[in-house]
Image (cartoon, rainbow, N blue to C red):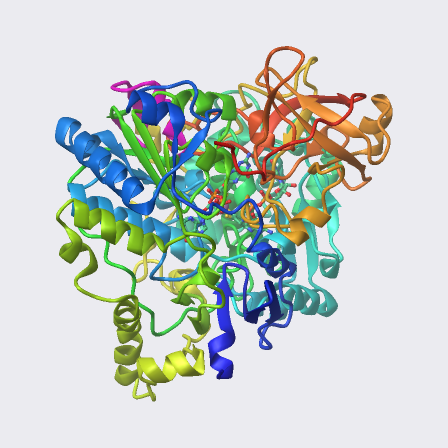
Amino acid sequence: MSKGRTLHSTHWGAFRGRFENGQLIMAPHTRDPDPSPLLENLKALRHRARVTRPMARKGWLQNGPGPDRRRGSDEFVPLSWDQALDLVAREVGRVAHEHGPQAVYGGSYGWASAGRFHHALSQVHRFLNVAIGGYVRSVNNYSAGAAQVVIPHVLGNFEQCTRKNVTWEQVAEHSEVVLAFGGLALKNSQVGQGGVSQHIERGCIRRAAERGCAFVGIGPQRSDMPEEARARWIAVRPGTDTALMLGMAHTLVAAGLHDQAFVNRHCTGWPEFQAYLLGLEDGIAKSAVWAADICDVPATTITELARSVMGKRCLVTVAHALQRAENGEQPVWMGAVLAALLGQYGLPGGGYNYALGTLAHYGRRTNKVSVGALPQGRNGVSAYIPVARIADMLLNPGQPFPYNGQTLAYPHIRLAYWAGGNPFHHHQDLARLTRAFATLDTFVVHESAWTATARHADLILPCTMSVEREDIGASGTDPLVVAMHRLAEPHGLARDDHDIFADLADRLGQRQPFTEGRSVRDWLAALYAPVIAGLDALGLPAPTFDEFWEQGELTLPQHADEGGVFSAFRRDPDRFPLATPSGKIHLASAAIASFGYASCPGIPAWIPPTEGPSAEYPLWLVANQPATRLHSQLDFGPYSQDAKRHGLEVCTISPAAAQARGIAEGDVVRLFNERGSCLASAQISPDIRADTLRLPTGAWYAPSIDGRGLPMCIHGNPNILTRDFGTSPLAQACTGQLSRVELERYDHPVPPHRAFDPPGP
Ligand SMILES: Nc1nc2c(c(=O)[nH]1)N[C@H]1C(S)=C(S)[C@@H](COP(=O)(O)OP(=O)(O)OC[C@H]3O[C@@H](n4cnc5c(=O)[nH]c(N)nc54)[C@H](O)[C@@H]3O)O[C@H]1N2
Ligand SMILES: Nc1nc2c(c(=O)[nH]1)N[C@H]1C(S)=C(S)[C@@H](COP(=O)(O)OP(=O)(O)OC[C@H]3O[C@@H](n4cnc5c(=O)[nH]c(N)nc54)[C@H](O)[C@@H]3O)O[C@H]1N2
Ligand SMILES: [Mo]
């Protein structure tokens, strides 16, 4: 076998692999200076949690489509592929005929797997468009839903502010101070959708620190900064960064230290912002002293920090996490404003790079040539929801709701179709989500494994993992295009999403429009064709598809590091305006003000959350991204499993919080609030605030009931505790990062959870 035929790619890295005697033998790509340990999880590809055959929920088969509270706890009945495809096609056809495609939810949010062709969301969207004329879609994502809406109002194009902004090379060479709100955790930047062949963050941060760049990690956990950064830790109270930034801004403005020339030439809204900052109208100066109480950071620290960065090549970053919370629009905006007062936008290694360090796409140069994407066809349905409003939609059909200055209405959904995502991982308040899914007539899911979402399906169709099919791995900021070879045969009766949809389209009389008569190889060649055209246009040698496929990879040329839009904007803001209403950075926004939202006014403002720690639930729960897997994917894999204790996810608390509750290292604990509870194993660390508890997301939901009769996850899924509440009427985005909780030692035997056991017939 040629060496090229052992290559494959994941969202967390490229590797060479062979599947022999039931074992996946793998080695990271040699070009990767810092490969991700998440690769290990793939070795569990033959785990019992895989879905081996099509199945239907018993109650659905017996009673037919319709709302059903048993969804999620019912038994399943095995089907042949023909039976399953007949049932799915008939039901999709029925709903489309009786209620129209506006009764089908195809948002199907989720990360799926790397690979441009078998990208599950593109496949399901193309299928619904071709077969029934469309579906209700979702807009924005769980990652950055608030930022995606506020940034175009105040700073410009989202991609230009995130992906095409300051590079890691600039940080390594030029930054003198990096103010990292929410940190720059290497656990997060190991992952990038579509694939990443070189993990460069650790090396660049090390180089910067060795050169003398001062990193400041601002957040509830010290561990959000890599050791290589040798960072100073400012342990801000969760959810209060906007106040801290305002306190810094006030320090600078009150002393006349801020860059007024930059503000005058490159910003708009200074009078309104200044009035708020100085308290000219509300009588409250947003000073360091004012901020200190809110943020639990001494006023002297705030003033000293502000003064110490002025005049330096300073980069401000704000992690996605900060905006995945109530009023999450504000820290994104205020970060941009603080950076404007520092006046470093557009200088190498300076300014504001929203979300640098949260994903591997950011901080890199962009490719000059790109791989094609699967065309999704035309969606004839105009209705949509902001993605995190899924449960609101299902529970409130027809109800109006505000979003970004508009009033929309929730459509009445009868059928939801999911491929490539796990709402029982990603959504908040899982007990409420269960009630929401109970309202459907039918829930169809394609999954490779028995996730909680698969268990809530009426019809579950087993699909391949990416290592069981051929594809092309590519992303816009990684130069390596990977010919993803099939390394193993499909598990059980699993089929590729594309083949499943092709057979369903056939039953609905639409095979040809769906497949266009192409084989998978034909599609891969078609997606590769733009690479040949692009390289030709640049006068560079372009391997044919067959050569590329045999070789296994191709390195694309990249654009020079020219500093993105902010560099040109700095030089000449009139000739190179930003993509905002005024072309400038908005310190105030007339558009946002005109919407009249109390929780999202026309200036970046400190607005206390409506739900925070209380006497009963005194701790902030930080439900962040897991270090040991991507979201819920491969939670049964060895790297994820090895980090668990007693089979439970590990939660981190401070020595003070542990002592106050009589909790010792390794104790089983119960986290609880008014919505539910979950079990976890306690880890005690001095590197977390005393009022904060961290439980990462991604343990598969294993439902039970606690002593109060409330829902409980006996495996450690924090989304049983989180609140299902939009950031604000502006973006209506996910607020899963922060919730209030209490915890106690759990002195009972740990009930065995069955999250990885297939449901019985
Ligand atoms: N409390 C709280 N909740 C959060 C967050 C938080 O910070 N706190 N973070 C949020 C964020 S940022 C995100 S992005 C979401 C992530 O939420 P998701 O993207 O939904 O999470 P994944 O576990 O990646 O789910 C992908 C699913 O697709 C399946 N899959 C993989 N490949 C394929 C394929 O080829 N075909 C099919 N049919 N299926 C496939 C996998 O088995 C897996 O079950 O979670 C969000 N939820
Ligand atoms: N290993 C791994 N990497 C991933 C993912 C994964 O699942 N696994 N998911 C990827 C995805 S889809 C995304 S969107 C990104 C997400 O990127 P982020 O959303 O930035 O990642 P998180 O780990 O959720 O949060 C980062 C840190 O923010 C801190 N934090 C929480 N609340 C606050 C606050 O109010 N103020 C401050 N200053 N800090 C706060 C927490 O201590 C937390 O550890 O990560 C990506 N990278
Ligand atoms: Mo995300």
Q: Residue at x 75, y 34 (%)?
A: 681
Viewer-closest of 341 and 346: 346
Above or below — where is 733 with respect to 616?
below
Magenta highlight on residue 404: yes
Q: Is residue 583 visible?
A: no
Up-down relation of residue 609 to residue 665 (above or below): above
Residue 651 is situated, as x and y percent measured from the top left of the image, at 72, 35
Of residues 55 and 156, the one nearer the viewer is 55
Magenta span? 388-407
Q: Is residue 385 magenta?
A: no
- Does 657 sit above or below residue 696? above
Q: Residue at x 65, y 45 (%)?
A: 306
Q: Position of residue 666 (x, y in %)?
A: 82, 36
| Residue nearer the viewer, 572 or 599 | 599
Q: Quadrant of residue 90?
A: top left
Q: Is residue 146 left or right of residue 678?
A: left
Q: Is residue 524 left or right of residue 115?
A: left
Query: In percent of the image, x 69 and y 13: which residue is there?
Result: 616
> In terms of depth relative to the viewer, which is nearer, 357 or 245?
357
Residue 311 image offset from top left, x and y in percent: 61, 57
Q: Which percent across, then down, holds residue 301? A: 74, 40
